[in-house]
Amino acid sequence: MAKLFGFSIGDKEKKSPSVISPVPQNNEDGVDNFIASSFYGSYVDIEGVYRTESDLIKRYREMALHPECDGAIEDVINEAIVSDLYDSPIEIELSNLNASDKLKKIIREEFRNIKDILDFDKKSHEILRNWYVDGRLFYMKVIDVKKPEDGIKDLRYIDPMKIRFVRQEKKKNKNDFTVKNNDDTKVISPEIEEYYVYTPKPSYPSNSITSGGGAKGIKIAKDSVTYVTSGLVDRNKGTVLSYLHKAIKALNQLRMIEDSLVIYRLSRAPERRIFYIDVGNLPKVKAEQYLKEVMSRYRNKLVYDANTGEIRDDRKFMSMMEDFWLPRREGGRGTEITTLPGGQNLGELADIEYFQKKLYRALGVPESRIAAEGGFNLGRSSEILRDELKFSKFVGRLRKRFAHMFTDMLKTQLILKNIVTPEDWEVISEHIQYDFLYDNQFAELKETEMMNERLGTLATIEPYIGRFYSQEWVRKNVLRQTDGEIIEQDEQIEKEIKDGIIPDPSAVDPITGEPLPDGGMMGELPTDPEIDDGLTNAQVQKDTKTAEI
C-alpha cells in the first residue's frame, strides 16, 4: 500500500506558509483527520445503532425493502428524475458562463460523452436511488495511462461497502509548517494526504471499518474516484448519513405496531367457550382425570390443514379456537358453558396510520401521497398543499447535491483533454449549472398564475406609463424581466416586425387599431370633405386670377 493506484490532477507546488492554518478544512465528506501509518483500527460507534459504516449501509438497504419506505423513496426518485422518450433527464446549462461559444460547445459535447459512458439516460433512476439510499456514491474513473489526453474511458460503480475515503495526517517531518504565536508557542500544521482504500473482499471485524481479518486494501489516488455524499453528516461522530437515517426509529415503530396488531388479531379474533365441569367431591387427582376425560370426549377434534385445504381429525395439533375447561366443586351451579367474546375493536387502524404518516414526514414526503385514492388538484396553485411546496424544494436540493457527480467527472474530462487548466476550472465551475427535466404540474401552475397576475397589474398601470412610471421600470419591476431578457425580447420583436410576423406598433393607430395611411399622423381625425357651393369653373378661375393680381 505504499504506492497509489490511479492518477492525480492538481497543483503539485507547495502552498505558501501565509495560507497555512492549524485548523483543518471544513469538509462535508464525514472524514476526520487522524494520525497513523494507515487507517487500520478506526471505527465508529453510535450508541449501538451501528458500529461500522458497513453496518449502517446494510441498515439503509434493509429499510429500502420495506413497502412503505420503498413507496416514499420511489416518490422522491420519480420527482427528481423524469424519464422521457425524447428528452434527457439532465442537461448542462452554460448561459451564465462568460466564455466563447466554441468552449461552451466543447463543454456540452464532453458532458454528453460522460452521460453516454454512464448510460445515464437509461440508468438514471438506478444511479440516483443508490445514492439516495446509501448516502454516498463512488465511481472509478478509468483512463488510458499511455494516452491520458483521451480522457475518461470508463466509469465503474464501486460498492460503498468496499471503499473508504481516508484523510491522513502525516507524521511530523520537514515538510510541516510551524507558526509561532505571541507567546512563542509553536503551532504545527501537518501535511494532509487524501486517498481511497478499496477492498474487493472486505471482512470487517466487529470494531473496524477497514480491511480487517487479513484482507488487504488498495490505495487509490483521490482524483481517480468520484465521491458524492448526501451532505448529511453526524457532527458528533463524523459519519456520512443517508436521507433514510432520520426514519430509522419511525420505521422500527411501524414494524412493531404492525406485528403486534397481527398477533393481537390472531389471538383475539375468534370466540372461545369456557366449560365449567362439575367434579363434585372427587379428590384432586380424580377431579383432574375426570376433567381430561370430558375434554377428550367433547373437544373439537377437527383440524384444518391450510397447505392442502383438508379438514382432518388430528389431536396432536392445537386449534386456535382452543376452549377453556375449568373444574367446579359441588355446591356450585353445576356444569356450565359460557362464551368468551373476541376482540371488539379489531377494525381500528388509527395507530397504524399515525406511524405511517410519521414515517413519510421523516422521509420528507407529503402525507397526502400515502392514500392511494388521493388525487392531485390541478386547479389554482394556491389550492395546493404547503407540503407539496416543501417537497418540491426538497427535491430541488437533492438535484443540486447529486449534480456534484457530473461536476467532478466533467472536471477530470476537461483537464485530461487539455481543454482547461485546473486554475481555469475553478473559475468556470462556479457558473456551470444543470437543468433537470421537470414533470411537476405544480411548477407549471405556479408560473402560469404568476404570469396572469403580472399581466393584470400591467393592464392596470398602463395608463400611467410615461407619466409616473417609465417603460423600463415597468418591465423590470412588474414583468420581472432581467436585462438579458429585455435585450433578447427587443431583438426578437424587431426581427418579427421586419419579417412581417407582427405589425409595426409605430404604423398602427392606437385609437382605432387600424393601419395608418402613408404620411398620416397617429390619432389624426379625418378632415371634412370640401363642400361645393355651386360655383362654376369660370368663377373659380376668375377668383384665382384676382388673387394672383
Image: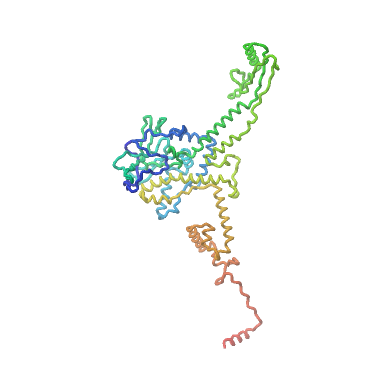
Please identify the quadrant where the N terminus is shown.
top left
Q: Does 108 appear above or below 2?
A: below
Q: Does 523 appear above or below 170?
A: below
Image x and y of residue 117, in percent: 42, 43
Q: Does 442 appear above or below 137?
A: below
Looking at the picture, tell me which residue is in the foreground, 464 or 298.
464
Taking 268 as reference, is 37 left or right? left
Image x and y of residue 491, in percent: 49, 61
Taking 331 as reference, is 212 left or right? left
> What residue do we see at 31% from left, 39% from top?
172
Return the residue found at the far left.
174
**Image quadrant assignment for residue 345:** top right
Image x and y of residue 207, in percent: 41, 31
Q: Can see residue 431?
A: yes
Q: How many marks?
A: 0
Looking at the picture, tell me which residue is in the foreground, 41 or 397.
41
